[in-house]
Image (cartoon, rainbow, N blue to C red):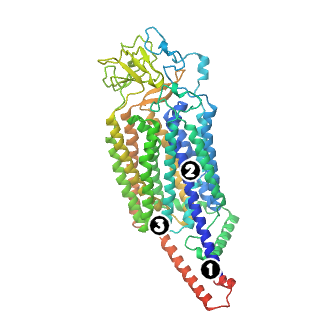
């Protein structure tokens, strides 16, 4: 091998290694950003309870991420290709870390978390003053003291979480459009689906880690280390429990900052993969491109912005694809954001268990689906029309599978005074005066404080006092209440802290639901890569970065921001009992009507996704006659490679036949 060929081969290896390094770095960036996002979604319930705010406000906080994202997405997508893309991505990762840190600040600025309770662990329990005592009074009743009420004004510390989420959204802006366009520009067309599949796999590993981290943090009490957890009268299954949500945000902040480091050492451009053997030709072409870019900058960097926007808006397949994405993203955001709450309310699991089960059952199938989807696209050289059919019919199959989830349900928790009478008969409407009966009317009990107990008759009561319990034994979560006049049973009437379990049948229904969810996740992810290829191939190469950014912008504006807000408001409408603060203000919801909750959680996304198949079928019809700008990208690349290889062989023959040519002359021939 000649000296020139050695230098070319060395340059080829270096360029290839830099592309692989970028692929590894962008995959890590996807891991870190999805780690932060999945952790945030998993902690929504904890944030709701920590700040005692309704679900609709929590939905707004969750949607604030999209607000930060859309503030920059169009500009980053367009101008980012004209700047140093790896450095832009690195800066974005640092900003994401800052946003995660801001979200953890309220924990260090607020007082310790206090949950509503009729039981005072710090008081003299032997007096049993929180039980049914005729003409007695209960401790920790809502106060009417104006001075105490002034101190108990609802905390606005959730604004830190809101601002932090906006900042995180701004930081995440350059990662997707610039990362995907960088891969598309410098990778082989047939390798691009596989690379994107690997990146999307990183986007699944991140949520898996995030959900496991969230499961751990949700199981640790929010003020652990500063309070004696043995004195707590609540467990992780209680709707008043708040986990250490702040701790995971600190970890996410550190991971995002570390992920940013490699991007500051990567080059602005690379030779096209597969053409690295002709480094000098590519170098000359890059120099020509650079001169053209400099010329464009001289006449104005925004000169082609409006033509690109006009071209994209006149592309029917691209616009229909955006419509489908907006509709399906509305359903997807709602399902993902509130799945932990759904499992808690429907199947009686703790937040920690719900988050862990989601991670175990849903994420591995999604990861496998992304990989298989990318491999199928590469191995069988799937065309754009074939990819559109694969994505459409697989989505239809997953949609039909979704309806089976309506069959795997559990009954409402029977809470006396809310949805059940004291005789154990279910009642449809909640009436405030139903919390009292002849058995507790003289107990002078608080009527709004949520401190549930489970009687040995299988019914739950708002508090031990409303259950008519007169005595108690034990401490903390092991406390047992006895001589409960409202608990109608043949033996000794007693109760323990917490709601009654829903039973083994409900646990079996949960397993069926998780299996259906795993199957749906696999089919959904299998269709994702072919669908994404339709998006990329329906645009011209110079429009891809702006097109991906515009697509992301539309999904943020019309789905990511409004969906959690209106979905949360609908969930609030199913609340049966709101928590009560010391001054009588309403806090977070404690229990929902699980039947209505189920219809909203499963029915609304089903209706949305069903409407998305109309534009999908129109796309399939248009693809029969419509020629896509990027449809022949693969064949074009192969033609270029063939010409370059022929030129290289010609020059090698000249080099072997002549001993006069030196390296400089050979470069000229090349």
Of discs 2 and 1, which sits in the foreground?
1
Q: Nearer the viewer, mark 1 or mark 3?
A: 1
Identify residue for label 1: 5
Residues under numbered marks 1 and 3 in contact, where contact means CB atoms less than 8 Å apart: no
Residue 216 in view of the camera: yes
> Foreground residue, 60 or 215?
215
- Residue 213's spot in the image, x, y percent? 52, 43
User: How many labels were placed on the picture?
Assistant: 3
Identify whether 508 is placed above or below 96: above
**Image coordinates for residue 426, horizontal then vertical, percent:** 32, 25
Residue at screen point 62% across, 51% down: 258
Q: CA distance from mark 3 to mark 2?
A: 34 Å
Q: Secondary structure at mark 1?
A: helix
Asked whether, in this view, residue 203 is left or right of residue 397, the answer is right
Q: Hey, which residue is sitting farthest right in the picture? A: 298
Mark carried by residue 32: 2
Residue positioned most to the top? 135
Tag 2, which secondary structure? helix
Q: Which mark is residue 628?
A: 3
The spot of residue 251 in percent (x, y) is 59, 44
The residue closer to the viewer here, 23 or 584, is 23
Q: What is the secondary structure assignment of the residue under circle 3? A: loop
Residue 531 in the image, given as x and y percentages of width and height? 44, 59
Residue plotted at (31% across, 22% down): 424
Mark 3 or 2 closer to N-term?
2
Q: Residues within 10 Å of mark 2 (few under 14, many from 20)?
A: many
The residue closer to the viewer here, 505 or 482, is 482
Q: Residue at x 48, y 23 (%)?
A: 476
- Looking at the rendered image, the disc whose residue lies closer to the viewer, 3 or 2, is 2
Looking at the image, the residue that sits furthest to the left is 490
């Amino acid at each position: 091998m000649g000296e020139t060929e050695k230098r070319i081969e060395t340059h080829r290896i270096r360029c290839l290694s830099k592309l692989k390094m970028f692929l590894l770095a962008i995959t890590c960036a996807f891991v870190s950003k999805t780690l932060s996002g999945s952790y945030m979604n998993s902690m929504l319930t904890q944030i709701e309870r920590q700040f005692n705010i309704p679900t609709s406000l929590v939905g707004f906080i969750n949607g604030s991420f999209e607000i930060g994202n859309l503030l920059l997405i169009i500009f980053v997508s367009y101008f980012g290709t004209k700047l140093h893309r790896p450095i832009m991505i690195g800066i974005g990762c640092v900003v994401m870390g800052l946003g995660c840190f801001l979200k953890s600040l309220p924990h260090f600025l607020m007082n310790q978390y206090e949950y509503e309770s009729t039981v005072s662990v710090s008081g003299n329990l032997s007096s049993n003053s929180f039980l049914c005592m005729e003409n007695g009074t209960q401790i920790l009743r809502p106060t009417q003291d104006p001075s105490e009420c002034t101190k108990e004004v609802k905390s606005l510390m959730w604004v830190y979480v809101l601002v932090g989420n906006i900042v995180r959204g701004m930081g995440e802006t350059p990662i997707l459009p610039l990362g995907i366009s960088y891969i598309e520009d410098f990778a082989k067309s047939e390798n691009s689906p596989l690379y994107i599949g690997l990146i999307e796999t990183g986007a699944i590993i991140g949520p898996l880690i995030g959900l496991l981290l969230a499961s751990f943090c949700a199981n640790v009490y929010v003020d652990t280390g500063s309070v004696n957890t043995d004195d707590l009268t609540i467990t992780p299954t209680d709707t008043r429990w708040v986990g250490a949500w702040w701790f995971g945000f600190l970890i996410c902040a550190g991971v995002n900052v570390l992920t940013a480091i490699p991007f500051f050492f990567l080059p602005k451009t690379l030779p096209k993969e597969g053409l690295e053997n002709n480094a000098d030709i590519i170098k000359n072409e890059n120099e020509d491109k650079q001169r053209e870019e400099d010329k464009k900058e001289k006449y104005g960097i925004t000169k082609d912005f409006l033509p690109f926007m006009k071209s994209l808006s006149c592309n029917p397949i691209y616009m229909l694809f955006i419509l489908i994405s907006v509709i399906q993203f509305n359903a997807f955001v709602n399902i993902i954001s509130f799945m932990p709450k759904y499992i808690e309310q429907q199947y009686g699991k703790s937040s920690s268990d719900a988050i862990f089960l989601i991670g175990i059952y849903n994420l591995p199938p999604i990861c496998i689906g992304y990989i298989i989807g990318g491999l199928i696209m590469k191995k069988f050289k799937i065309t754009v029309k074939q990819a559109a059919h694969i994505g459409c019919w697989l989505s239809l199959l997953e949609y039909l599978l979704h309806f089976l989830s309506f069959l795997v349900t559990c009954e409402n928790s029977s809470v006396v005074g809310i949805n059940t009478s004291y005789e154990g008969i279910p009642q449809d409407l909640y009436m405030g005066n139903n919390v009292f009966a002849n058995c507790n009317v003289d107990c002078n009990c608080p009527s709004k404080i949520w401190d549930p107990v489970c009687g040995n008759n299988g019914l739950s009561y708002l508090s031990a006092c409303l259950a008519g319990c007169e005595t108690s034994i034990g401490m903390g979560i092991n406390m047992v209440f006895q001589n409960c006049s409202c608990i109608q049973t043949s033996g000794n009437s007693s109760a323990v802290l917490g709601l009654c379990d829903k039973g083994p049948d409900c646990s079996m229904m949960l397993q069926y639901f998780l299996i259906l969810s795993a199957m749906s996740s696999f089919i959904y992810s299998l269709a994702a890569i072919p669908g994404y290829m339709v998006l990329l191939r329906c645009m011209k190469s110079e429009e891809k970065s702006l097109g991906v950014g515009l697509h992301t912008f539309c999904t943020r504006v019309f789905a990511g921001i409004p969906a959690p807000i209106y979905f949360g408001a609908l969930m609030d409408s199913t609340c049966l009992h709101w928590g009560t603060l010391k001054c009588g203000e309403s806090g977070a919801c404690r229990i929902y009507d699980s039947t209505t909750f189920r219809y909203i959680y499963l029915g609304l996304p089903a209706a949305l996704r069903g409407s998305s198949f109309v534009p999908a079928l129109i796309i399939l019809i248009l693809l029969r006659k419509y020629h896509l700008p990027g449809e022949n990208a693969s064949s074009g690349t192969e033609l270029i490679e063939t010409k370059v290889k022929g030129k290289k062989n010609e020059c090698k023959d000249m080099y072997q036949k002549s001993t006069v040519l030196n390296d400089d002359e050979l470069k000229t021939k090349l």
